Image (spheres, rainbow, N blue to C red):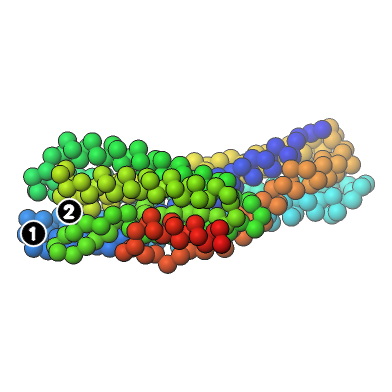
Amino acid sequence: MSVDLNHGATEIDSANKSQASQGLIIQTYCQSVKSQPAVNFAGYDNLKRYEQDINTGLGQAKAHADTYINVIQPTIITNISNISNYYAMQNAIPVVLPAGATSERWLQILATLEKMATAHKATADATVTALNGLYNNLTEDAGSFTDTVGKLNSAVNGDNGVISSINDQLKDIQSRIDGTIAGVVVSGLAIVGGVFLTAVGGIAEFVTAGTSTPLVVLGVAITLAGVGGAVAAGLALKGLYDSKARLLTDKSRLSDEVGLALGISQGFSGLSNQVQGAVTAALQMSKAWNILSSDLGTVADDIRQGRLSTDDARTLFLTAANSQVQQVTQDISIIKGQMTGVTNLEPMPNRNIKDIIDDLERRVVA
């Protein structure tokens, strides 16, 4: 046979799952950024400039989060539809081109299909470009915040060596939080009847200017109704969020102002890392479309050169339609429903994320 069309289908399926899982996580992380209240250092004249810098940076980060939610995420869902449309057309080939169809007709249909795959690759490439732009913006946000946190800490006579040590510990904790959340999403993606529930809440409270301000950036929970591991994941998340809160609210090492700013800064870095992962997933999708396009070109060339009969080509597409492509189309249908049917609980900045996780667990086991 000319090529194995199942290979391209497998690549598309894998890329779609990677992109969808990253997209679901980033969307929830972006909601946490949008829910972060502004900081207030009123009464501390020496901290006023840092309050302004932090709130300006927070405003920029919220704008970047909006860009993801309103522009980039819809293109990821569009890509899911593109895959569905492509395979609907590919699966129709054995019907459109019955036994005995001419090679000219085959080449015409294959050219149309290849053009379709090339157009979808262009959409995937545009997603890569948009995500790279977002990653660069978030990296800049994180770098600016890191600088501001250091200056703020110096202004309250803090030890920047302590800041560095705590930040390293926070990165480790956030990595484990990310891994736990990713485990829930990946294990639940493409599960029939699975509905994702997401929530945003506070990680810790900080008293500044006589009022309590929560750290909400990256205070998220994602679970899936009907998945047995949800409670275990919730327990792990609560422990990790507790560790993060203790580090940031240790008044023997950090003032409340610095703890809050450091938490926001570390959150921006965490979101940036997730977007970097999304870039990799989008590149994987672009590569998968390229493989499909190349395979179609090979089939067409083999027919043109007489190396493959039209009846053998028809068998090739029938075999694909009855094997791996069936799994792809089933996964696509489920994932699209999951991505568009996420239950997003109203963000609750003033409620601790650990309590919200308890609520989610009760909902999924009810």
Q: Residue furthest bottom?
A: 346
At a point 45% along the width and 42% down the height, the residue shown is: 179
Q: Is residue 193 above or below residue 125?
A: below
Q: Secondary structure at mark 2?
A: helix
Left or right placement of residue 47 versus residue 202 in this view: left
Q: Residue 257: which numbered mark, if any?
A: 2
- Residue type, numbered disc 1: Tyr
* Between 263 and 306, the one nearer to me in the picture: 263
Query: Where is residue 152 drawn, in percent x and y?
Result: 14, 49
Q: Can residue 336 be seen in this snapshot?
A: no
Instruction: Give x and y (percent) for residue 344.
Output: 48, 63
**Mark 1, secondary structure of its residue:** loop
The structure residue drawn at horizontal position 18% and vertical position 38%, both measured from the top left corner, is 162
The residue positioned 80% from the left and 54% from the top of the image is 92
Q: Are marks 1 and 2 in contact (CB under 8 Å)?
A: yes
| Residue lying at 22% horizontally and 37% vertically, measured from the top left | 164
